[in-house]
Image (cartoon, rainbow, N blue to C red):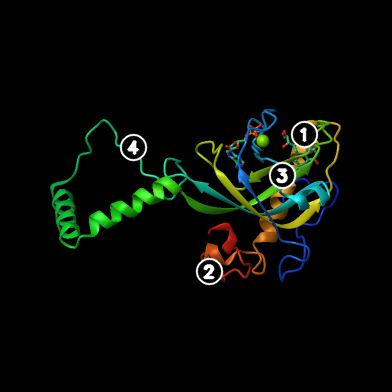
Amino acid sequence: MSLPNPDNRPLLIGPPTGPEAPFPFRMEGEVISGFGRGSKELGIPTANLPVDDENTWIKNIDSGIYFGWASLKLPASHPNSVLYQKPPTSEPVMMEPVQQQQQQQNQQQQQQEGGIESAQQAKLVDQQTGQWQIYPMVMSIGYNPFYKNTVRSAEVHVLGEFAADFYGVGMRLLITGFIRNEKDYSGLEALIADIHFDCEVARHSLARKGWRVRELGVKEGGEEGELDGSWLVR
Ligand code: ADP
Ligand code: RBF
Ligand code: MG
């Protein structure tokens, strides 16, 4: 580990067998604008969720930093969507004659099999509704003592690279564990260093079999996860 870890914090939270009671918690909402403090410029954008009365547990839960899985219902128009298709370029794509012939053959075959129509229909539905995609996450619930907020917020840093914002998109959370209490800091650098370490804690903790969601399938050379993440994708 090369990241600074001044407080000698543990890299793994919880036992290898998976989340311990009362975890996991579920939370759901559409991503809203946050405080606009430029978290993105710090390299730590946070997708904010409304903290409403429906989530009674969130009122009773300790403020602090949590980790788990986030699922985003990215529309087909989002560049990170598995359904995304690049808009056609204005330049015509040059194709080798052999490729062109192959494409025509494929199209003819699909038409004969009646496949193209049903494939297009399926795509239409997907584009309207989007598709859930799962990522690891770290999140902060509370008052951000460094900024002395007066309202309680819930904000999620998704561990993934996004080519575009996803405001308004549906987000589901499976909160699997507690990392630490919220802290005040004498400077922004110390806050950022702690958040970077939180990300490492989440990555390492969630990489274990008992914490990986089954729905993500088997990664190269790995075993299938044991955690039930079905709620994240249905
Ligand atoms: P705000 O104050 O509006 O929350 P942020 O600077 O925190 O602004 O940026 C949050 C937005 O950035 C999210 O709503 C989302 O659309 C986008 N975003 C891009 N990448 C991520 C990421 N890895 N995690 C969370 N949000 C991200
Ligand atoms: N804010 C605090 O005031 N104290 C904290 O200890 C703290 N920890 C955070 C940990 C994580 C993983 C995340 C995503 C945010 C945290 N925040 C904390 C909130 C942070 O101040 C907020 O996201 C700012 O907008 C970042 O500039
Ligand atoms: Mg934010």
- Numbered mark located on residue 189 in the image: 1
**Secondary structure type for disc 2:** loop
Task: Specify the amino acid type for callout 3.
Answer: His
Where is residue 231, by image quadrant?
Answer: bottom right
Q: Which residue is mark 2?
A: 221
The residue located at (27%, 57%) in the rendering is 118
The residue at the point 61 percent across, 67 percent down is 228
Location of residue 30 by image quarter: top right
Report the Cα–Cα distance between label 1 and label 2: 37 Å
The reply to whether callout 4 and callout 1 are in contact (CB within 8 Å) is: no
Q: Amino acid at mark 4?
A: Pro
Residue count near mark 4 (Cα–Cα under 10 Å), binned few <14, some 14–19, many ≥20? few
Please indicate whether residue 200 sits to the left or right of residue 220 in the image: right
Mark 4, mark 2: which one is toward the viewer? 4
Q: Secondary structure beneath disc 3?
A: helix
Q: How far apart in space, not on screen, are marks 4 and 1 (Cα)?
A: 40 Å
Q: Is there CB contact under 8 Å for labels 4 and 3? A: no
